[in-house]
Amino acid sequence: MILPIVAYGNPILRKPAAPITADYEGLSTLIDDMWETMYASNGVGLAGPQINKPIRIFVMDSAQIFANMEEEDETYPDEPGIKKVFINAKMVGLEGEEWVYNEGCLSIPKIREDIQRPELITLEYLDEHFVQHKTTFTGLTARIIQHEYDHIDGKLFIDYLKPLKKKLLQGKLNDISKGKVKVDYKMIFAK
């Protein structure tokens, strides 16, 4: 089932999410719905708070970026990418040189900005079968994971912008929070 995506301005996007246990009701269905919602809205990642669930879960698929890249596009160390579920993720470390990439967010439609992030992230997390992992990710995969991890910590990509840039975007952000934005997927707007 395709779920509505929470728009900028909803308080759930600013609250750290809570961990879940293996007996979380309807987890398998929720994960399936998250995949379906993410693909239907042309996203590469989706976190629990973005579908109005204050829980520490996110899905991401960097493989689709590589599948859709032109041959002459830049190369990345994580090619061909991965598709993964992350539950109760805990960041162990951020390393490497910071690099810039133009990011967007399903919860903040029609706004894209160059964001600087470290090239490597190490996470401890559970997969959809509640098997424990500790993995270091790089490239576009690391970038998407950092973006989605921020969501479960109550952060948004616009928080990385310089104050002046954020001030210049404030009108657009206010419009999004009031539902004055047209997108081709279902959204929930702040009241």
Image: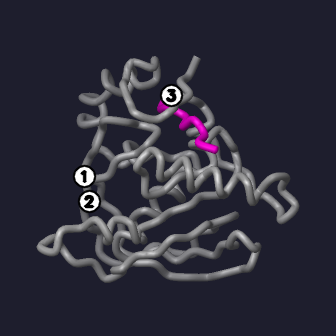
Quadrant occupied by the N terminus: top right
Mark number for residue 9?
3
From the viewer's side, name the closer residue of 104 and 28.
28
Residue 131 in percent (x, y) is at 74, 79
Residue, disc 2 = 101
Residue 42 in percent (x, y) is at 40, 49
Rendering quarter of residue 70: bottom left
Magenta: main secondary structure equals loop
Other-residue count near label 2 (Cα within 10 Å), few / some / many at <14 / 14–19 / ≥20:
some
Other-residue count near label 3 (Cα within 10 Å), few / some / many at <14 / 14–19 / ≥20:
many
Residue stretch in magenta: 1-8
- Residue at figure coordinates x 50%, y 63% from the top left: 60
Mark-to-mark CA distance, 2 and 1: 5 Å
Q: Earlier in the sequence, mark 2 or mark 3?
A: 3
Rendering quarter of residue 91: bottom right
Q: Earlier in the sequence, mark 2 or mark 1?
A: 2
- Residue at figure coordinates x 30%, y 59% from the top left: 116
From the viewer's side, name the closer residue of 55 and 46.
46
Label 3: state its secondary structure.
loop
Q: Amino acid at mark 3?
A: Gly
Label 1: state its secondary structure.
strand
Mark-to-mark CA distance, 2 and 3: 24 Å
Other-residue count near label 1 (Cα within 10 Å), few / some / many at <14 / 14–19 / ≥20:
some
Q: CB atoms at circles 2 and 1 under 8 Å apart?
A: yes
Mark-to-mark CA distance, 1 and 3: 21 Å
Residue, disc 1 = 114
Indicate whether residue 3 is drawn in magenta.
yes
- Relative height, residue 64 to residue 1 (above, below): below
Q: Earlier in the sequence, mark 1 or mark 3?
A: 3
